[in-house]
Amino acid sequence: MLSPVDISIVIPIYNEEANIPALYDRLRSVLDPMGRTYEFVFVNDGSRDQSLKLIRLLADRDERVRYIDFSRNFGHQIAVTAGLDLAAGNAAVIIDADLQDPPELIPQLYKRLQEGFEVVYAKRRTRQGESAAKKYTAKLFYRLLASITNISIPVDTGDFRIISRKVIDALKMMPEQNKFIRGQISWIGYRQTYIEYDRAERAGGQTGYTYRKMIRLALDGITGFSDLPLKVATISGFLVSGIAFLVMLYTLYSRFITGDYQPGWASLMVSILFLGGVQLIAVGIIGEYIARLSANVRQRPLYIISDTNIPLPVEQPQHSDRA
């Protein structure tokens, strides 16, 4: 294994060729004056552009540049997990390559870590270059998650943060397939604090986080840290059963007591559709949880490494296809 360093910079990469050179230069200009040993851990998550080529060029001229190349796209959260698994730092900074999160914040994050905190996360004060719909849905998600989970997950935060070696080692003991790292870090506990910043526009390229991926991440966060949806399904079942029982009593009363009974197709269809809809929703919620249980039971590896310049543990296979 590599010798320990003070700080590992973990950078998930997916089609970021437009941003990698500028990111590398800005990170170096920030880290060099700190007087700490550091490494870059680039995790190429199945990029289809020249991202991997650029990273390898950086690695050839700077021995502090490490890279991990996945066999395919496994997702942002898995890429961050792989970077943390193989990081040699006594602390690790998680930062995206799009330069929306400023590398210039790292010295402040590290300073707070040195004050005795185990996690220092960056909290967004403003978010530039994002649509009103995305801002609203993100705000809604963070507040919904905070209200239904039994742990305190900070609102208006992403994965941009610094964590200590103690937290890195704790994350390694949480091998679930459906990762929601910011939730896992909150669950771990320890002393945590934040600093605020204004998030900039994306420097170049297009975001890999589509609405579909955002919905998937939201589901991972909710199902991984709350059982409220299951409770809602159960309560809904009791409520619907109660309403159906009252309707049945009213029907019997109208038929045999008052005689004011008009058989109707509309009322029958409404009842069937209402009951069927609630049942399907409940089954769907239960299915989400069962699917996640099934993924963990299969115990497939979180990721497969195609190539890397980091010495791997014996249990982690490497299948290199580099010429």
Image (tube, rainbow, N blue to C red):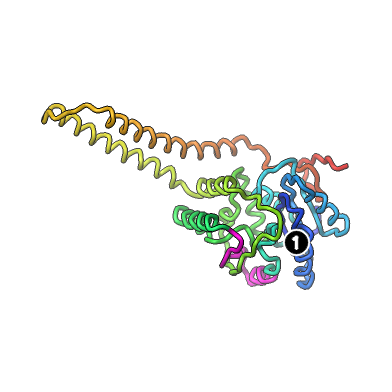
Tag 1's secondary structure? Answer: helix
Report the quarter where the C terminus lies: top right
- Give left or right: position of 123 versus 14: left
Whole-percent x and y of residue 99? 69, 61
Residue 118 in the image: state x and y as whole percent.
62, 64
| Residue drawn at (59%, 39%) of the image | 296
For the question of whether residue 163 can be seen, the reply is no
Circle 1 crowding by C-alpha within 10 Å: few under 14, some 14–19, many from 20: many
Q: What residue sits 24% from the left and 28% below the top? A: 264
Q: Tell whether position 288 is magenta.
A: no
Q: Give the x, y percent position of residue 246.
A: 23, 36
* 7 to the left or right of 112: right
Residue 127 in magenta stretch: yes
* The image quarter in which residue 35 lies: bottom right
Residue 256 can be seen in this image = yes
The residue lying at 64 percent from left, 71 percent from top is 112
| Vertical side of 17 occupied by 124: above or below | below
Vertical relation: 126 (above or below) 49: below
Q: Which residue appears at 58% of the width and 53% of the height? A: 184
What range of the chain is rendered magenta? 107-130
- Residue 312 in the figure: left or right of residue 303: right
Q: Which residue is mark 1?
A: 23
Residue type indicated by callout 1: Leu
- Image coordinates of residue 289 in percent, x first then y, are 51, 40
